[in-house]
Image (cartoon, rainbow, N blue to C red):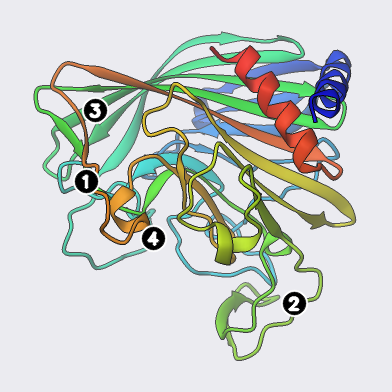
Amino acid sequence: MKFRLTLFALLASTIGSFAEEVKLVEQKDKQQIDVLVDGKPFTSYVYWSNQKKPLLSPLRTSEGNIFTRGFPLEKVAGERTDHPHHISSWFNYGNVNDCDFWNSPPEGFTRDSKTPYGAVRHKSIKAISSGKGAATLEVSSDWIMNDGSKVLQQDETLVFRASKDLRIIDRIITLTAQDKDAVFKDSKEGAIAIRVTRALEEPSTKKEIFTDAAGKPTEVAKLDNTGVNGIYLSSEGKVGEKDSWSTRAKWMTLSGNVKGEDVCVGIFDHPKNVTYPTYWHNRGYGLFAANPFGAKEFTKGKTTLNFTIAAGKSETFRFRILIHSGKLTAEQTEAQYQQFLKDVK
């Protein structure tokens, strides 16, 4: 096994050596920063005023295929129209001091809840740096409660990396509690997440609502699973939502084929993160999320965390989103994970 990991580590290093130009282009009028790889779009950091959190939208493979769901930003035939707050890729949480940041609906949607909604508001761009193989973006955001008060400040460094067949986003997120303790009450709703396109869902036979070719929501009694081929795999060998949801693992991948391209998407947890290895809130319908805080729901009440950042104190979280064009074995993914630990201390 040691030889195999060494071999795959060498492979990962070799892949990374084919570095490509990564450029960040700020568009103030559009409230976004575009990430280009050799002049072609990879993703955008967007802080649109009609959204309740900053987003990375959309996410593309090295071949340019978008693998995040279009809804609710655009209407794509055959896509699900559930959970309008699941938008591309984001970071927030379902219960901070009894305020819900996760389920807060975007503009144009309503959602009844006994728990008041909050919002994560982009505040500033602190630094932008483009370069060969990687680009770095430093931003700051405020977590605003329903009463208008600020509960957390989020200072984040995003590193966008690109090489042949590989796209990476490292998110180093520091949360600082303001004048009160910030209590992350146990909830499955969190925290770093991706909502994927239909092809990367796991096949299902349940009745669902999808967007038709005219862009209208349509109830479908029995699903057509043509081209639906997603499958989860955890670092602990758990396969599929049924076996891996609510389990703990240092990494999880979601693999499938999108428009003829084999794709492997991974989320990596870091040993310095609180409660490492993280719990997983990964659903067959296309929600892929790592949640360090939801112990009570994931353990069916056996463990309660209520993770707290004391007033004036900070906590830093480190995650990697990996997007690989082509299949990855567990051993190859582990090699990529070890590279993550070298890149992000």
Q: Measure how far apart labels 3 and 4 are at the Cα level.
A: 26 Å
> Residue beneath label 2, please?
225
Q: Residue at x 35, y 50 (%)?
A: 102
> Residue beneath label 4, please?
108
Q: Measure how far apart labels 1 and 2 are at the Cα level.
A: 37 Å
In this rendering, the answer to whether 338 lies above or below 131 is below
Closest to the camera, between mark 2 and mark 4, is 2
> Residue beneath label 3, please?
152
Of 31 and 135, nearer the camera is 135
Of 318 and 234, nearer the camera is 234
Q: Measure how far apart labels 3 and 1 are at the Cα level.
A: 15 Å
Mark before the other along the chain sequence, 2 or 4: 4
Mark before the other along the chain sequence, 1 or 2: 1
Mark before the other along the chain sequence, 1 or 4: 4
Q: Amino acid at mark 2?
A: Asn
Q: Amino acid at mark 4?
A: Gly
Q: Residue at x 86, y 43 (%)?
A: 326
Position in image of residue 105 (x %, y %): 35, 56
Circle 4 residues within 10 Å: few <14, some 14–19, many ≥20: few
> Residue beneath label 1, please?
185
Position in image of residue 169 (x %, y %): 62, 27
Q: Are marks 1 and 4 in contact (CB under 8 Å)?
A: no
Task: Please tell me the numbered disc located at residue 76.
Answer: none
Secondary structure under tag 3 reads strand
Closest to the camera, between mark 3 and mark 1, is 1
* Location of residue 85 by image quarter: bottom left
